[in-house]
Image (cartoon, rainbow, N blue to C red):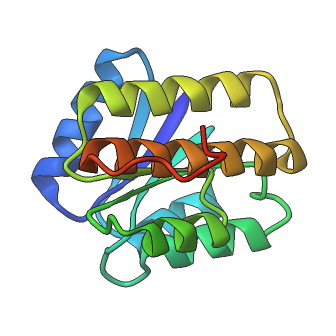
Amino acid sequence: MRVLVAEDDPISRHMLERTIRYWGHEVIPVPDGAMAWMFLNLRDLPDIALLDWEMPKIEGIDLCERIRGNPEMKDLYTIMLTSKGTDEDMLQGYQHGADDYVSKPISADDLKERLDRAVSIVGQHIGIDKRREVRFQNMKDFMGRKKASSGSPLPDGAS
């Protein structure tokens, strides 16, 4: 799979690039949102885009919204990378069209799990409507992990 990595921190971008290449994927690293948007408009689309939320020129959240608004890009699988970790931030990411959401600092296991899920969905050619259901499940999973790690009990009916 071809994975676009849009991350403004050079060390983080390098580590993401090396790790994802190690897992067998082609990586297209870019240093900011404007370069990511330019790449998406000038070349064949990658299969997956990892977008840092806070980047210069165009933030990842805005990129996500642009991607969802472009009929030629609407099926691009997007994973938001961010140090923003509140439930409201996560909901905002999903509302702007992110397929998945990973909080920084990113563990290799968590990234691998999310990337494997993305590869599976992209490989099965699951369309945007079905992915909305997956996005909702990802949101529930994220909130469940966050509550479990903070020691707070899950709300009634949550799984």
Residue at image point 54% right, 53% down: 155
- Measured as percent of width and height from the top left, residue 58 is found at 43, 81
- Measured as percent of width and height from the top left, residue 62 is found at 54, 79
Q: Quadrant of the C terminus?
A: top right
Residue at image point 73% right, 66% down: 68
Residue at image point 32% right, 74% down: 54
Residue nearest the observer in this picture, 30 or 68: 68
In the image, residue 75 sits, relative to residue 15, either above or below, namely: below
Decide if residue 72 is in sight here. yes
Q: Is residue 102 left or right of residue 64?
A: left
Q: Quadrant of the N terminus?
A: top right
Residue farthest to the bottom, as pictured: 57
Q: How many marks?
A: 0
In the image, residue 11 sits, relative to residue 23, either above or below, namely: below
- Measured as percent of width and height from the top left, residue 57 is found at 37, 84
Decide if residue 44 is in sight here. no
Q: Is residue 144 left or right of residue 151?
A: right
Residue at image point 33% right, 64% down: 85
Residue farthest to the front, as pictured: 156
- Measured as percent of width and height from the top left, residue 157 is found at 66, 46
Residue nearest the observer in this picture, 38 or 80: 80
Residue nearest the observer in this picture, 60 or 41: 60
Residue nearest the observer in this picture, 120 or 69: 120
